[in-house]
Amino acid sequence: MPGIAISRRFALTAAGLCVALAMTACSKQEGDAPASANPAPPVPARVLVVGTDAAYTPFESQNDKGEIVGFDIDVVNAVAKKAGLEVKFVNTPWEGIFNALEQGDRDLLVSAITITDERRQTMDFSQPYFDARQLIAVRNDSPVAKFDDIKTMKVGVQNGTTGDEVVGKLLGKSSTSIKRFESTPLALKELEAGGVQAVVADNGVVVHYLANNTAGGFRTVSDASFPVEKYGIAVKRGNAQLLAKLNQGLEGIRADGTYAKIYASHFGNEPK
Ligand code: ARG
């Protein structure tokens, strides 16, 4: 069925192109300035593939039915609707997520991705859509009161995240005390098991995990030295057309109250 929908859409697009070409031909005959040689390619009228590491509740996760759900998913669905794009979400492990974008296996990424200068070198980001901060999770009986206190401990992070980065700065990037996990839940499980004494990860995910795993006996420690991080939707470097659509959609859902509704439905209050 989707195949039929796509080919019908393609036929429509092709028809549109013919009309456009015919019009160009007309205007040339009338002696107008020639049409630009290289018009920007339109965003393809096909279902765009969105990569997301769906092990990051409440931003993205898989429900019992195997559907990918969460705040990020709601935001991108709403953005796509506003911008006239069709999207589908594909679970994509964090480890390979940026490569999948680079290779063209994914058209865009939404995965609670913090916009960083380093990442900006290899991909483009939409306007920020969410503010976050690192947060430390420790066991209830832990002496940790501030970030510096974990310097001498074994610390769990999700490999290649901003949490990994800040801990790398404190302990030294190649410190063997940094235990890098494929996912944030795995790092938190290890805290429960006692293999690490602290986990540093995005506040939203840590808070959610603690609220739902009261048996784990964790508490959080915030530290003012952690900078504010901004999440953005990533596209392949130079994909200005798609980026413009996403930004237009983001603006639209902020302006009409959809964003605030989505925010409230996941976080229970108004956007900060
Ligand atoms: N915000 C952090 C970063 O960009 C962590 C994001 C991890 N996201 C995920 N879906 N696992 O590095």
Image: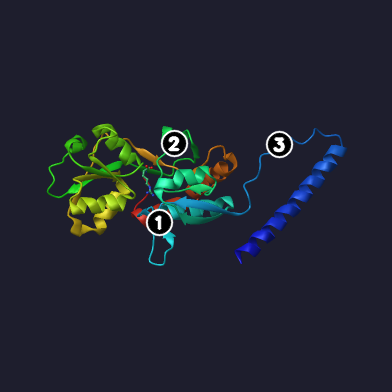
Query: Badge 3, how many Cα within 10 Å: few under 14, some, many 20+?
Result: few
- At mark 1, the secondary structure is loop
175, above or below 99, in the image: above
Left/right placement of residue 159 relative to residue 10 reads left
Q: Residue at x 63, y 52 (%)?
A: 45
Q: Is residue 214 above or below residue 138?
A: below
Mark 1 or 2 closer to N-term? 1
Residue 119's mark?
2
* Residue on which the image places disc 3: 38
Spatial CA span between label 1 and label 2: 24 Å
Check disc 1 and give the amino acid type: Gly
Residue 46: x and y in percent read: 61, 54
Image location of residue 92, percent across then percent down: 44, 52
Q: How far, Cα to Cα, is label 3 from label 2?
A: 29 Å
In which quadrant of this rendering is ligand 1 seen?
top left
**Residue at 78% of width from left, 50% of height from top?**
18
Disc 3 residue type?
Asn
